[in-house]
Amino acid sequence: MTEISPLDQARILSEALPHMQQYDEETIVIKYGGHAMGDEETAKNFARDIVLLEQTAINPVVVHGGGPQIATMLKRLGIVSEFAAGLRITDAATIEIVEMVLAGSVNKQIVGYINEAGGKAVGLSGKDANMVKASKTTRTIMDPDSHIEKAVDLGFVGDPEKVDLTLLNQLIGYELIPVLAPLATSKEGQTLNVNADTFAGAVAGALKAKRLLLLTDVPGVLDKSKKLIPQLSVKDARKLIADGTISGGMIPKVETCIYALEQGVEGVVIIDGKMQHAVLLELFTNTGTGTLIHK
C-alpha cells in the first residue's frame, strides 16, 4: 500500500465534506451479495466502511444475500436442489437450511464484523415484527414440446408485498445498524425466501432511502463496447434492456433498481462489491463508482 502524507489524508477528508453533507441524516440501504462478501478481509473492510457511515450521521441499513453459502451447506448435508427456469425450487427441507444459513451464520457473521469495528449492529430477518410480508412467487415456463406456458411452483420462495417499518423506525437514527436477512412471512405464516436484491428494493422503497447500493460482482451496467455507463435514467435503462445491451443476469438487477425507484428510492447504484471501499468511493468522492440509475 502506498504511504499517504498526513497533508494528503487531511485534504481527502476535507474533500469528502460536501458529500457527507448531502447524505447527512439520510438512510442508505446497502445490499451486500453472497459473491461480494469475498474473503474475511474484504468483509471486515466492508464492516469498517459501514461503521464509518454511521459515524458521519448517515443511517446505513444492510441487506445481505448468501447464495454461495446456502449452496455449500446444502451440498454438505447432501440435499439436492431441483431447478426450474433457472431458479432453485425451495422445498421444505431446503427452506430450513436457507433460514439457518441466512438468518443464522451469514447474518451473525456480518453483525460480528460490524460490532468488532466499533458499530452496534442488530441482526434481523424480514420475519421479525412482521417487517416484510410476502406472497408466493409464481413463474411460468414454456414447455418445449407443447409450446404451452406452464406455471412453475418454486416452493417456499416469495415476492415482497408489504413492509412494516415499526421495528426499523425504532433502530434507525439511534446509532443502531440493522442487518437484514431476506426472509419473509406469508399470510399463512410460512417462511419464504426472497431474492435479496428485491428484498433490499422493497425495504429501501418503504424507508424512502436516499440511495440503494447494490454490491455485486460486476462493475455496473456496461454499454455495447463493454464500457461502464456512469448514469442511466429509467427510460434509458428500459431502452437498453429492449435492445439487448442489458442482458442475462443484469436484467433482473436493473429491474430491481427500477422497482426500488418506483417505490420511492431517490437513486440506485450498481457497484462492484469486490472493489476495496466501494461504498465510500460511491458516497464520498466526486467520481463515484458503478452505475447510478435514477428516475
Image: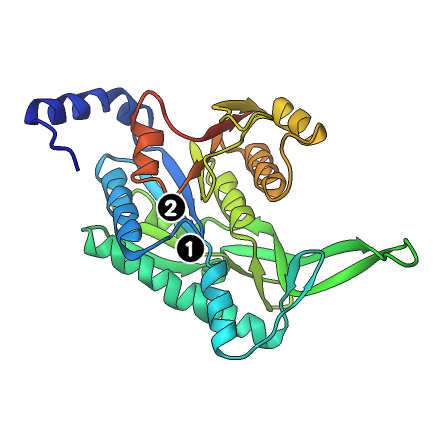
| Mark 1–mark 2 distance (CA, rounded to whole Å) | 8 Å
Category of crowding for the residue at label 2, using alpha-carbon neighbours closer than 10 angstroms: few (below 14), some (14–19), many (at least 20): many
**Residue designated by label 1:** 180
The quadrant in which residue 29 appears is top left
Judge whether residue 125 can be spotted in this image: yes
Q: Which mark is residue 263?
A: none
The residue tagged with tag 1: helix, strand or loop?
strand
Screen quadrant of the C terminus: top right
Residue 217 drawn above or below residue 221:
below
Judge whether residue 174 can be spotted in this image: no
| Amino acid type, mark 1 | Leu
Question: Residue 88's spot in the image, x, y percent?
Answer: 63, 62
Question: In the image shown, does 83 or 90 lie closer to the viewer?
Answer: 83
Q: Which mark is residue 61?
A: 2
Category of crowding for the residue at label 1, using alpha-carbon neighbours closer than 10 angstroms: few (below 14), some (14–19), many (at least 20): many
Residue 256 drawn above or below residue 286:
below
Question: In the image shown, does 132 or 156 lie closer to the viewer?
Answer: 156
What residue is drawn where x is 53% and y is 50%?
Answer: 199
Side (left or right) of 136 relative to 172: right
Question: Residue 39's spot in the image, x, y percent?
Answer: 32, 55
| Amino acid type, mark 2 | Val
Query: Is the C-beta separation of discs 1 and 2 under 8 Å?
Result: yes
Question: Residue 145's spot in the image, x, y percent?
Answer: 90, 59
Question: Residue 130's spot in the image, x, y percent?
Answer: 51, 59
Q: How is the image coloured?
A: rainbow
Query: Which of disc 2 and disc 1 is earlier in sequence?
Result: 2
Point out the residue furthest to the left here: 6
The quadrant in which residue 260 appears is top right
Question: In the image shown, does 238 or 171 lie closer to the viewer?
Answer: 238
